[in-house]
Structures are given as C-alpha cells and as structure tokens.
Image (spheres, helix red, strand yellow):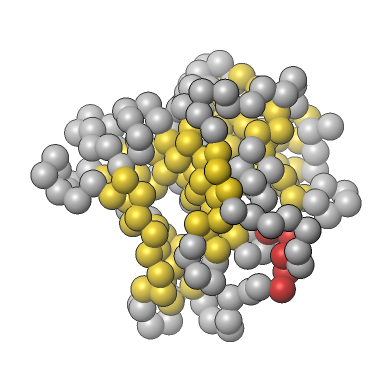
Amino acid sequence: MGRQHPDRALGSRHRRRLGRDHGARRDPQGVFLYHGNTLDKRGEAGDKHTNLRKINALTGEIVWQYDVATSYDKAINGGLLATPLLGQGEISDLVIFNVSKTTGAKAGTMVALDKLTGKMVWERSMGRYSWSSPVAITSTDGHQYAIMCDSGGTMHLFDPNTGEDLSTVSLGKNTEASPAVYGNMIVVASYDKKIWGIKIS
C-alpha cells in the first residue's frame, strides 16, 4: 500500500494485551446497536460531547456510554458521521469508532471500545478528522487489518489491535467515502475526482 508513514504529529495510546484469546469475550446473547451522535443542533451553548453508545435493540436500554469531547462548528458537523467497525475474529471483542472534530477544527479521534464493558482499549488522535467508515480486512492467515480514509486525503492501513498505522497512501484530496474491499483490492472515491483501486500486498 505504499511506504510506511506513521502519524508523527499525534500518537496513539492503548491498553490491549496482545496474544490472548480474543474470541473468548463475546456479547451475551442478544441484539445490540452501536451508535453515536453528531454535534450540530445543540449549538454553541450545548453539551460538546459525542456520546458513543451500545443499545439493546430489543428493549431500547442503553448498555453503556462513552463520551468524546467534540468541537462545535456551525458550518461543518463534528461527532460520529461514520459507521463503527464491529470487530470479528481476533478483534471480535472490539468496536472501533471514528469521531470527527475532537481536539480541534481539523482533528479527529479513533477509539476502540470493549464491546461488553464500553471501556477504552486504545485511542488514537488523528491530525485530520474523518467521515469515512473504518473497514476490516482479513488476511489469508486469518489476521485482521483495517483501513480508513481522512479529510486530508490519506488512506490509513492500521492494526486494529493497537490503532497504529502500518502504511499510508495519498488519495489527493478529502475522502469522505467509505472504502469497499474485495479480495486484495480496495476501491474508494475522493474529492480529487478519481476512483482509486489499491492492491494490498
């Protein structure tokens, strides 16, 4: 996917112990929604947090809530505008959210939460926010990777266990679209008026 280029401006922090049986911790039997809000109609005086929630879809009960401080911008919405990534396989205990406009007008936060408890497993500050949904990729040996695109036009291939970049590639301009993956090919469109096909190797 191009040369390795870690996000040097802003780092990540994580509390994940690698090597354990990731499939052992699953949601109890039930149907759940993973949801978050945008920060727009609340206005400048309203609560400036994005509320990430797990909701029991059968009862409406809020199982847990994790709040992320978010900057208010009346021109462009902040908060959760992307679909969260529900982990499978070795990351089946995680749900990964991509929250925009968190620490500033251009910045964002990607955070992985434990599906059962809602506790933060790792959190990564992004120099450019994203409205693009993170997408998981399973390699031939069963190992999980993930990709997401940001408003600076960068596609990130990252380790979903830690949030750390493995590689990046430039897509020219802001990429709000969510990538599609088929086999070892990623397809996504950007504001550069191009549709990109990127081979994973």
Residue at x 64%, y 46% (from the top left corner): 162
Q: Residue at x 76, y 35 (%)?
A: 185
Q: Residue at x 41, y 74 (%)?
A: 63
Work out whether 173 lies above or below 92: above
Task: Name the spot of residue 109 as percent of width and height, x first.
Answer: 45, 40
Residue at 19% of width from left, 51% of height from top? 47
Image position of 57 (left or right of 148)? left
In front here: 176 or 65?
Answer: 65
Horizontal and vertical percent for residue 121?
56, 56
Image coords of residue 156 (percent x, y) = 62, 32
Give how far across and how far down residue 31 sits, in percent.
52, 77
The foreground one among 55 and 112 is 112
Quick one: which residue is furthest to the right in this view?
Answer: 141
Res 154 quadrant in image: top right
94 with respect to 62 (left or right): right
Q: Nearer the viewer, residue 177 or 19?
A: 19
Residue 116 is left or right of residue 38, and the answer is: right
Residue 21 visible somewhere in the drawing: yes
Quarter of the figure with the N terminus: top right
112 is higher (above) or lower (below) than 115: above
